[in-house]
Image: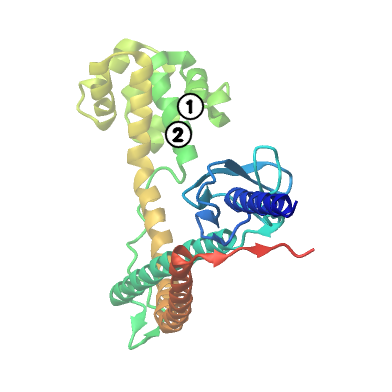
Amino acid sequence: MINNSKSNNDKLALLLLIMSIFITACSTGPAKTTETYRSLNVETSKKDRQQYFLLDQKGRVVSRGYGNNGKLSFSLDRLYNPGNQCFKVVDRQRKVFGKLEAINLSVLPEFRKTESELKQINASLRSLQSQSTRNKRALNNSKQQLASNRAYKNGSCILPKQRYLAPKPATKCSSEYQCKQEGGAICYSMTFGSTGCSIAASELNISGMLTSPFCGATAAKLAKQKYGLGDAVADAIIGGIEDEAKSTWDQGNWFGALFLGAIAVGGKYLQAESCTDNFIKKHYLPLANWKQRKAYIEREPHTAIRQCKTSLASIEQYPSKQKNINRKLTSLHEKKKLLETRYNQLKLSASPVQHCKR
């Protein structure tokens, strides 16, 4: 009886020993859990070969991993943003693995934040360096402009004297509009006869004397009296006789020369247009050029002193601008150095996983 009792006790002890070994072998309780900027690493049983899932707070799969020789690793995409949420590790049956029910990923967010701040600082550094280069270029340009600016004298800007202006040229026309009307009336009447003025009004897109019923007579009078083109031209305009007009081309006078280039090309419209253009060039263009020159000469001293003041201000402001840029560069370089140190630490570190606060 005593032997049977002892035998039963031995069997019970053996059974408990086997259960203990089995539980120990199959236990999935993590001994150590760490995270890096690229992975979540869990120490587990060496015999564990199961697949596990890292889930976010909404139950979405973030990563998958298999037990392998006592290690379980979940890869993390460096672009993934875990945010401020809790994660958990589960098996295929969605049972929580060990105590990893509410854990917080802190290394990856800090790594991404540090990396983003480094990119921003590098961009700011490039921008400031470009600005410094532009300021240096502007300084050199301002110095060159001052060297050639006649308003700059002995470190100051003084309004220079106005340059010499040639006398106003004497021309038959006082405006381009007047010249186009009178030249158009003469040239188109010479080419088209009695319909010349109306054609000129349409082609040149002006009215005035060209739309007057007395345009032809006025053109003949202007050609003879004002522009000195001779009786033959005036008669040709009044009579509208092409033969008489053509005879003037061989007389060697100026008006005939207006037509010679156009005739070679051919076409009455081209003849009249070329004649009008040359008429304007002869009787108004010298005055137009003089007016343009006069405006420039009157404006130039004021332009010179304005440019002088702008260049001088740019030179005077350069030191303070560059000092401000250098101060910002120094501050950014200091911040960059600290961030790079932390960035490298995060790349090499393996921090214990923190549990979410409830």
In x, y percent, where is residue 192? 41, 14
Indicate the amino acid at tag 1: Leu
In x, y percent, where is residue 25? 57, 50
**Which numbered marker is on residue 238?**
none
Nearest to the observer: residue 86 or residue 294: 86
Q: Residue furthest right?
A: 358
Q: How many numbered marks, from 0 up?
A: 2
- From where the camera sits, is residue 342 visible? yes
Q: Is residue 49 left or right of residue 303?
A: right
Badge 2 crowding class, 10 Å Cα cut-off, few under 14, some 14 to 19, many 20 or more, is many
Q: Residue furthest bottom?
A: 154
Q: Quadrant of residue 243?
A: top left
Badge 1 crowding class, 10 Å Cα cut-off, few under 14, some 14 to 19, many 20 or more, is some
Residue depicted at x 68% and y 48%: 56
Q: Secondary structure at mark 1?
A: helix
In x, y percent, where is residue 316? 42, 83
**Which numbered marker is on residue 180?**
2
Residues tagged 2 and 1 counted as in contact (Cβ below 8 A) = yes
Indicate the amino acid at tag 2: Lys
Q: Quadrant of residue 31?
A: bottom right
**Residue for badge 1:** 204
Q: CA distance from mark 2 to mark 1?
A: 8 Å
Q: Is residue 105 left or right of residue 162?
A: right
What kind of colouring is applied to the model shown? rainbow
Q: Secondary structure at mark 2?
A: helix
- From where the camera sits, is residue 78 visible? no
Residue depicted at x 34% and y 48%: 286
Nearest to the observer: residue 337 or residue 127: 337
